[in-house]
Image (spheres, rainbow, N blue to C red):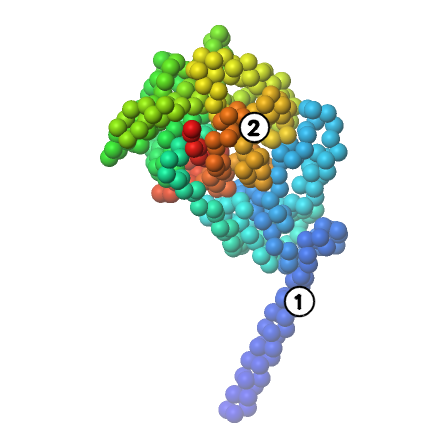
Amino acid sequence: MQCEVNRTLVVKKKFFFLLVMISTLSVSAVERVSLDSLRANWSRYINQTVEITTPLVVCGNYYDSLILAPERIFCPEERAVGLADGDSTVYHQIAAHNRETTVCLHCRNSYYNTRTGDIVRRLRARVTGERQLLTGKSIRTRHITLKPLPKRKRGELRVVGANIENYFADLGGYATRRTTPEQQAMKTRKLVKAMRRMKADIFALCEMQMGDRAPQMLLAELNRGAERYDYVRTAWPDKDQIAGCFIYRKDRVRPTGEWLSAYQDTAGHYRPRMITQAFETLDNKGKPDGRKMIISLNHFKSKSTRRRQYDTNVKRMENADSLLAMLPVAAEMMEDPDILLLGDYNCYTQEQPIQTIVRAGYTDLLQVFCPTGYSYTYHSETGYLDRCFATPTMAEQVVRVTPWHVNADWYYSHGAYKLRDKSHHRYADHDPIIVDIKLR
């Protein structure tokens, strides 16, 4: 009996040591390597599990993969002159750097809980090809600390420019074919929650449905509990088309005079997308206090998904030329030189339409206050598509300009809203631009 017990103990010890040897071999099979060393010789590590010692940043968040790099990558046109304006060595260098430094990690990740900008440390994954990694597990990411919403000081006027991404009251038409009533209601709740947190006096909104139904639907929720906001009526019919819209707090400001479009003499679809309106501020008794400003809201031609600005640059240049021709007319008609330009210009900082506006004498306030920021992420590259310009007299009165990163960093799929999400994040794909002004 004692011999059988001893034999059993010997077998268990052998089995235990075998497990220890297997685990030791599996641990030793995982080679620790920096990203630079991995990039220098991808073929050596094919089908091998490695632990990347370099901290990585999530640059792109997709359903079944993450795009990782040592730091956030910017669109080349944000930092260098693009090919539309002539060949640029710096442009090619940035584009090559973005390609070489990014890796694609295929994983089963909780994409709603991962956002671009998150940090990944000590990543273990199998190398399946050049710049291709695979892991069967979800990975842990560390959220970066987001900057809080800037506080407005007493006496300042807050204006927000935002693309709200196809906010339609009528579903089933332009860009809303996959949207359900439940998703529409959730989008409204998110947008209203974000607008209430921003506490702006004027919202200059792109991609609102033409007509009165969409603004009224938004205001019905925004004014719930206190009827503070109204919108500028443009007498456009309800139509399956996007337009610009001004929503303002009626106890602090009010529109004055008629609105003006950069395409005033045409009936094309750019006319409702590029509008200008003057506003005057009100005192505590609701009477004009003598201060006013002009806001020009513009939405330029969108980019081609294949070749970025090259296919549509001509049309955006036409948008810029029409805008620059209209602004002096607006200043004379509305009797005010203080003009603030907001909206989605669909152009990065170094692209030709933006530089044309700057050369015309308008200050790019984003480059003054936050030149290293961004408002949009596309194909894992960040940059400013949403702009903020000002005439010289207006620029002197601006005290703060900042993008609020409430949208661009979060995962989004048009038909995959997380309906139980009660946050104000990702009501659209663009970050709003917040402008605080001390009007004289």
| Amino acid type at mark 2 | Thr
Q: Earlier in the sequence, mark 2 or mark 1?
A: 1
What percent of the width, then of the height, locates residue 313? 62, 21
What percent of the width, then of the height, locates residue 112? 46, 45
Q: Residue at x 24, y 35 (%)?
A: 225
Q: CA distance from mark 2 to mark 1?
A: 58 Å
What percent of the width, then of the height, locates residue 389? 53, 27
Question: Are discs 2 and 1 less than 8 Å apart at CB?
Answer: no
SS assignment at label 1:
helix
Q: Is residue 105 left or right of residue 82?
A: left
Q: Report crowding for label 2: few under 14, some 14 to 19, many 20 or more residues within 10 A (C-alpha).
A: many
Q: Is residue 263 left or right of residue 18?
A: left
**Dividing the image into 4 quarters, which one contains the C terminus?**
top left
Of 90 and 53, the residue lying toward us:
90
**Residue 413 visible in the snapshot:** no
Q: Which residue is denoted by mark 1 in the rendering?
A: 28
SS assignment at label 2:
strand
Of 431 and 59, the residue lying toward us:
431
Of 23 and 297, the residue lying toward us:
297
Q: Which residue is denoted by mark 2 in the rendering?
A: 363
| Amino acid type at mark 1 | Ser
Q: Residue at x 70, y 34 (%)?
A: 91
Of 326 and 396, the residue lying toward us:
396
With respect to residue 118, does 258 lie above or below?
above
**Which dot, 2 or 1, sits closer to the camera?**
2
In which quadrant of the rendered view does residue 348 lie? top right
